[in-house]
Image (spheres, rainbow, N blue to C red):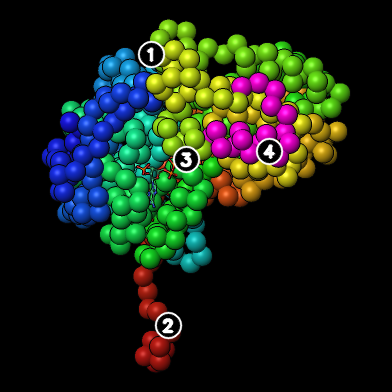
Amino acid sequence: MLKMYIGGRWVSAVSGRTRSITNPATGEQIDVAAEGGAEDARLAIAAARKAFDESDWPHTSARHRARLLFRLADLIERHAGEQARMETENNGKPLADAEDDVLTAANVFRYYAGLIGKPSGQVSDLPGSYVGRVVREPIGVCGLIVPWNFPLMMASWKLAPCLAAGNTCVFKPAELTPVTAVRLFELMEEAGFPPGVANLLLGEGRTAGAELAAHEQVDKIAFTGGTETGRGVMRAAAGNIKKLSLELGGKSANIVFADADLDIAADYAVSGIFLNAGQVCSAGSRLLVEESVYDRFVDMVVERARKIRVGNGLHPGVEMGPLISEAHMNKVLGYIKAGIEEGAVLLTGGKRITEGELARGFFVEPTVFGDVHSGMRIFREEIFGPVLSVTKFRDEEDAVRLANDSIYGLAGAVFTSDAGKAERVARRVRVGVFWINVYHPAMVEMPWGGYKQSGLGRELGTFGLDAFTEVKQIVHNLHPGPLGYYHWNRS
Ligand code: NDP
């Protein structure tokens, strides 16, 4: 059974409740997990609070914390094959993608292990005899809440900078995908993280997660998930003015101009949406194509979409796995129905796959809609599935206008051979992540996060570490003398 890790001990839920964990490719149970609730969350928060307030963890040297993070990265790499397999069994993604995720996670721990020892802060030569210093300190107890689409990778994005900075934390994976999180915490224990510094809470968002978001002993919430859930987390966090990082939804535009290398652009357009079966916050779910090449380019995309090998991620050669759950699959199928009803042209896909062994899992065909207009729900709402909406544009101005016609602002891309046009578009599209002639690279060195309703703050890079620190100014008077303010100073 998958247990929680609280205060350095592996424990079941106080209620004794458990949850069946399934493989979305087969519908079969792969494990059983402790189902924590609000009471378990309070125990985990108390353990993290104690470790922050009473142990020397926040005051350990950066070098010491870096050593633990480096050790953890090595352990992740040593057990990479096993963790990738676990991720595929629990999340459904192709094994090669899961292997990439595991190595990325190791790399993220290494990056922050390296960064924490680098110079930071500022010194100011102030007027008079004052010297000012700006230092960064840990925030305190952090609640880290992640979704099911990149379980281990999202864990690393949050845990690495959080712990590097000297915080303590309660980490909650999605209720559907706890498997690699449990393994990660076993490795953290082996690496030597002290009890209470990092706690693992399993269970539902609306009970365990909500308690984390609201609890007054939690100083910061770092959340990745849907925008509606994020809005609720923000409200709950207002009680004690928690620091917040939110990485939310997206409806990213991938803009293809007629002068692009269309073969290359078509490959990226396809991976932009169908990677991880479209369950990616930065998915290029709106493909905007210049009208002079629209028909030709759409044909190229459709031809590729039809050739994608869909199946159980554990099977060699599979390029797209299932959706995470039956409920999520039904939500995605609902959007496909809405697209048809609203008059978009279904060019390929559109159905659940019900042949052979795939009938047991939650597979949806790679789906492409053409002639999508900006008023349609499939243009406006995050589907989070393998559904691409294609829209025609007239010129650069029109492309930028369509790209910005969204409540979201996470990512976007442009494909063109005109460098000037690429730069102009890059600057005018209101998103936090923008790619030119490429789609989807997420680099630990570069900040990740969204404009508008795609979130708050940035993860990764130096920004990701800053988000787990408080900034303190310290002013030192080098020549203390009489204050000279009160009458007794003047007589
Ligand atoms: P959620 O946003 O609800 O889940 C993300 C995480 O938040 C999970 O760990 C979840 O817990 C937790 N959570 C849920 N409710 C609360 C709460 N009230 N307080 C604190 N934490 C909470 O994602 P869903 O799985 O419900 O997906 C809904 C939609 O959100 C998707 O269809 C997609 O559009 C979008 N989404 C976007 C993601 C992104 O990366 N931008 C990732 C995932 C979803 P648990 O799952 O355990 O209940």
Which residue in the structure is indicated by mark 1? 314
Camera-nearest label, 2 or 3? 3
**Which corner quadrant of the image does residue 405 belong to?**
top right
**Which corner quadrant of the image does residue 472 belong to?**
bottom left
Compare marks 3 and 4 and give the one earlier in the sequence: 4
Q: Is residue 90 visible?
A: yes
Q: Identify the residue at image location x=76%, y=31%.
A: 371
On whether residue 105 falls in the magenta region, the answer is no
Camera-nearest label, 4 or 2? 4
- Mark linked to residue 484: 2
**Mark 2 neighbour density, 10 Å: few (under 14) some (14–19) many (20 or more):** few
Residue 457 position, x and y percent, is 51, 48
**How far apart are the two marked residues, 1 and 3, measured between alpha carbons?**
30 Å
Compare marks 1 and 3 and give the one earlier in the sequence: 1
Compare marks 4 and 2 and give the one earlier in the sequence: 4
Check disc 1 and report its element: helix, strand or loop.
loop
- Mark linked to residue 459: 3
**415 horizontally vs 120: left or right:** right
What residue type is disc 3 on? Answer: Glu
The quarter in which the C terminus is drawn is bottom left
Camera-nearest label, 1 or 2? 1
Check disc 4 and report its element: helix, strand or loop.
helix
Residue 44 position, x and y percent, is 21, 49
What residue type is disc 4 on? Answer: Glu
**How far apart are the two marked residues, 4 and 2, measured between alpha carbons?**
78 Å
Residue 413 position, x and y percent, is 67, 30
Q: Identify the residue at image location x=78%, y=36%.
A: 399
- Tell me where the magenta segment starts and ends, as one range: 332-349
Which residue in the structure is indicated by mark 4? 341
What residue type is disc 1 on? Answer: Leu
